[in-house]
Amino acid sequence: MITDILFNLVSYRIDEEPHIRVDQAKCASCANRACTFACPARCYEWNQGRGQLDFAHEACLECGTCLLVCEAGAVTWHYPRGGCGVRYRLT
Ligand code: SF4
Ligand code: SF4
């Protein structure tokens, strides 16, 4: 699983305030849901039962891919607050 791989490569200081927000109204009518397969950390998942996008910011790698692939402009993105976020152990 991707979470097992990431466990050995990165660590996090979680910002309780999400640094990424999505506009669920735009997601509901999204044609491709690109974020659900483009995010390397699997932060996005389409919840068929609830008809909405589930998102968890805690595992975010801060790569910015979701912001780029969302053609609907539903993603609002900024870095986590100072001192928070991902730390790469191999850099
Ligand atoms: S690609 Fe954008 S609009 Fe589509 S589901 Fe993801 S965040 Fe929502
Ligand atoms: S910035 Fe990268 S890791 Fe974070 S949610 Fe977006 S695609 Fe996933």
Image: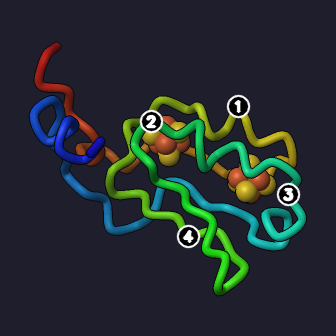
Label 4 Cα crowd, 10 Å radius (few <14 / some 14-19 / many 20+): some
Ligand 1 closer than 8 Å to label 3 CB: yes
Secondary element at tag 2: loop
The Cα–Cα distance between marks 2 and 4, rounded to whole angstroms, is 15 Å
The residue at the point 14 percent across, 42 percent down is 7
Q: Which mark is residue 30?
A: 3
Residue 1 lies left or right of residue 91; in this view the side is right
Q: Which mark is residue 68?
A: 1
Circles 2, 1 touching at the beta carbon (< 8 Å): no
Which residue carries the number 4 mark? 54
Sequence-wise, the earlier of marks 1 and 3 is 3
Label 2 Cα crowd, 10 Å radius (few <14 / some 14-19 / many 20+): some
Residue 32 percent location from the top left of the image = 81, 48
Sequence-wise, the earlier of marks 1 and 4 is 4
Quarter of the rendering occupied by the N terminus: top left
The Cα–Cα distance between marks 1 and 4, rounded to whole angstroms, is 19 Å
Determine whether 22 is above or below 71 in the image. Answer: below
Which residue carries the number 2 mark? 40
Q: Nearer the viewer, residue 31 or 79?
A: 31
Sequence-wise, the earlier of marks 2 and 4 is 2
Quarter of the rendering occupied by the C terminus: top left
